[in-house]
């Protein structure tokens, strides 16, 4: 992670976050580490540390946070958010960061593939005729193999 | 009791055992499940990368249920959370609903904000009730020692689930499993995540989260796991073998859906509950509950 | 021109980000215990008072130091410790009337506000401007302005009340 460099802090980052759902209350964090103690990812991997991410956001380290790979390690299990004594919506905050990162083009390949698949095909596991054959064998109804409506919901 | 049956993506493609057993159990309990062919992905998988589009997809599905004047029943906890969250948000926030409706207009729809979303397990626990379920039981599942995995999105974020169960001390699945005469086994980290959502980001991290729970269950005398989400099943059932070979260990822990456990107690046979499709073999564990086939 | 920290505790929300950035700036770690500025809290009353060095003119810490390790910086006018001379006796800690001289038992050193060399980070990061970095000479003007504003508001209210009677 390296040393914290406040020199290039983006002083608007906090305000930008505070305006969006999930980012409103991060300055209420008083560093009790309940989030870290509750986090199933932190338990197995020290690259992910919710408190550190909140602090980096408070310090205005926008570029470092949004281009990081560690924000994507959040499994969005809500354990931290349910337990935060300060009422910080930590999981929603992580989602906000990931969304902002994605908008700036930072996205793991697997996440990008899912996004393209879901917005393109309407399903994360598109169904083919073979699937329907297997379904028919156990008396399950057929599921459509194509999905046109996504083009209407997300034009061009 | 009648619901629009939301299958999602994973279940019809990869968890037909969950679907087939759920349909059997629902049928027995007179819950009518209406198939809606036009349902699309709930939006959950793209919430991290594009929350707006995620909500639009969820709202589209809510609209389809609205057209049929039905509430939605889900089997998948992730679908349940994405749809419940959208339903919750769009019923409270008129501006958000207007924004979403601009997109839905492209498909000729308008969401009014009144559809409710329920997980199947919640319906069983809250609406059907113990007595009514028990009436249909034919077998006592003694000797079955079950480690229950609640998963995350079945209960969280708590503010969208009307407090139907307690996040820090959940009991709905415990109660349902106990009805069958099976024993519920407690274990360390019972409330923890399966690691699934991290799978497309970092497989090693995801599988070590999964492994932690399998390890914690292995030291108890549980002989099966119980789930209510196909995504968790991908981690514990489909990936159990690869964790075993990666870490040079053996669990051989059958992973059952709640609906399969209830279905066995109701007297359905192995095939009717799709037990032949579970990845970790269940035959030896469950042989005592079935007559010779 | 000499500048000082002007703390308006009525604006402070108690978020303690000043403490964090202070420790990051000086020691490279997020650790409020290493902060030069400290927010004293009375949670029940919603009262938060950030406390830091006043850079006193006739500084007790400077006077009490038995080895003359404490002096005043010529350019920025802050009171500073020369660690080559300091013997760590903590006399300065004992004598400071504001509790602004701190002691770190891990580094075995006293430490205090050095105005971050002219760009105080507590000021930079305070969202509500509870801490400002202003010309020492003009300190009273701000206070005067504030007080005058309150007075004029009070007068207007009194006038309105009278008119209503």
Image (cartoon, rainbow, N blue to C red):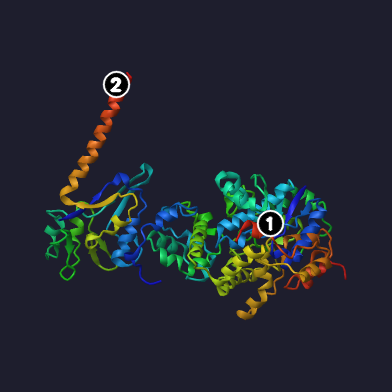
Within 10 Å of disc 1 (Cα), the crowding (few <14, some 14-19, many 20+) is many
Where does the image place residue B88, in percent across and percent down from the top left?
60, 48
Seen in the image, is C120 located left or right of residue B1?
left
Q: Helix, strand or loop at disc 1?
A: helix
Residue shown at 73% from the left, 60% from the top: B258
Within 10 Å of disc 2 (Cα), the crowding (few <14, some 14-19, many 20+) is few
Quarter of the image that includes the C terminus of chain C: top left
Rendered position, B215 above or below B267: below
Q: Which residue is mark 1?
A: B173
Q: Helix, strand or loop at disc 2?
A: helix
Q: Which mark is residue A111?
A: none
Q: Residue B138 sits in which quadrant?
A: bottom right
Of residue C133 and residue C83, the one placed in the foreground of this image is: C133
| Callout in the foreground (2, 1) | 2
Residue shown at 35% from the left, 56% from the top: C17
- In contact (CB < 8 Å): disc 2 and disc 1: no
The subunit letter for the residue under badge 2 reads: C
Of residue B201 and residue B176, the one placed in the foreground of this image is: B201
Query: Separation of disc 2 and disc 1 at Cα?
Result: 69 Å
Whether callout 2 and callout 1 share a subunit is answered no
Q: Which residue is mark 2?
A: C162
The subunit letter for the residue under badge 1 reads: B
Seen in the image, is B155 located left or right of residue C46?
right
Where does the image place residue C33, in percent across and percent down from the top left?
32, 60
Residue B81 in view, yes or no: no
């Amino acid at each position: 992670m390296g040393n914290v460099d406040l020199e290039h802090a983006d002083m608007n980052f906090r305000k930008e976050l505070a305006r969006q759902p999930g980012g409103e209350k991060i300055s209420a964090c008083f560093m009790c580490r309940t989030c870290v103690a509750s986090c199933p990812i932190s338990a197995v991997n020290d690259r992910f540390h919710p408190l550190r991410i909140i602090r980096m956001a408070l310090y205005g380290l926008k570029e470092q946070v949004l281009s990081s790979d560690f924000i994507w390690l959040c499994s969005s299990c809500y354990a931290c958010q349910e337990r935060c004594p300060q009422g910080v919506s930590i999981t929603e905050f992580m989602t906000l960061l990931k969304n902002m990162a994605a908008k700036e083009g930072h996205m793991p390949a697997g996440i990008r593939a899912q996004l393209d698949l879901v917005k393109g095909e309407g399903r994360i596991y598109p169904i083919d005729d073979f699937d329907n054959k297997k379904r028919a064998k156990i008396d399950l109804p057929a599921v459509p193999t194509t999905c046109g409506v996504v083009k209407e919901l997300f034009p061009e | 009791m009648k619901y629009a049956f939301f299958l999602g993506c994973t279940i019809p493609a990869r968890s037909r055992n969950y679907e087939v057993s759920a349909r059997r159990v629902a049928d027995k309990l007179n819950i009518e499940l209406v198939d809606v062919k036009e349902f699309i992905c709930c939006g959950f998988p793209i919430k991290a990368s594009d929350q707006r589009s995620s909500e639009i997809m969820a709202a589209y599905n809510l609209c389809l249920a609205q057209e049929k004047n039905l509430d939605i029943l889900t089997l998948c906890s992730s679908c349940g959370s994405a749809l419940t969250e959208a339903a919750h948000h769009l019923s409270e926030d008129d501006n958000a609903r207007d924004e979403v409706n601009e997109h839905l207009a492209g498909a000729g729809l308008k969401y009014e904000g009144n559809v409710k979303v329920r997980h199947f397990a919640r319906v069983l626990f809250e609406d059907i009730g113990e007595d009514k379920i028990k009436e249909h039981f034919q077998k006592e599942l003694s000797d079955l020692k079950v480690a229950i995995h609640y998963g995350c999105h079945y209960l969280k974020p708590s503010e969208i689930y009307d407090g139907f169960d307690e996040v820090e001390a959940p009991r709905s699945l415990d109660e349902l499993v106990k009805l069958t005469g099976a024993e519920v086994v407690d274990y360390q980290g019972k409330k923890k995540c399966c690691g699934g959502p991290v799978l497309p980001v970092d497989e090693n991290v995801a599988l070590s989260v999964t492994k932690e729970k399998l390890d914690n269950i292995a030291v108890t005398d549980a002989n099966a796991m119980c789930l209510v989400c196909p995504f968790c099943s991908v981690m514990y059932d489909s990936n159990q073998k690869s964790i075993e070979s990666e870490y040079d260990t053996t669990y051989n822990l059958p992973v059952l859906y709640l609906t399969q456990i209830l279905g066995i107690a109701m007297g359905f046979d192995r095939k009717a509950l799709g037990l032949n499709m579970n990845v970790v073999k269940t035959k030896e564990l469950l042989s005592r509950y079935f007559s010779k086939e | 021109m000499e500048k000082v920290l002007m703390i308006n505790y009525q604006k402070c929300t108690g978020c303690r980000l000043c403490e964090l950035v202070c420790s990051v700036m000086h020691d490279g770690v997020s650790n409020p215990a290493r902060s030069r500025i400290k927010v004293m809290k009375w949670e029940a009353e919603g009262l938060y008072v950030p406390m830091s060095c006043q850079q006193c003119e006739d500084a007790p810490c400077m006077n009490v130091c038995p080895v003359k390790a404490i002096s005043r910086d010529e350019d920025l006018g802050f009171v500073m410790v020369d660690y080559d001379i300091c013997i760590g006796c903590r006399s300065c800690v004992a004598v400071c009337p504001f509790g602004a001289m701190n002691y770190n038992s891990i580094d075995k050193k006293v430490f205090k506000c050095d105005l971050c060399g002219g760009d105080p980070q507590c000021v930079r990061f305070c969202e509500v401007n509870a801490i400002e970095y202003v010309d020492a000479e003009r300190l009273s003007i701000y206070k005067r302005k504030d007080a005058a504003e309150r007075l004029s508001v009070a007068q207007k209210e009194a006038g309105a009340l009278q008119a209503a009677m």
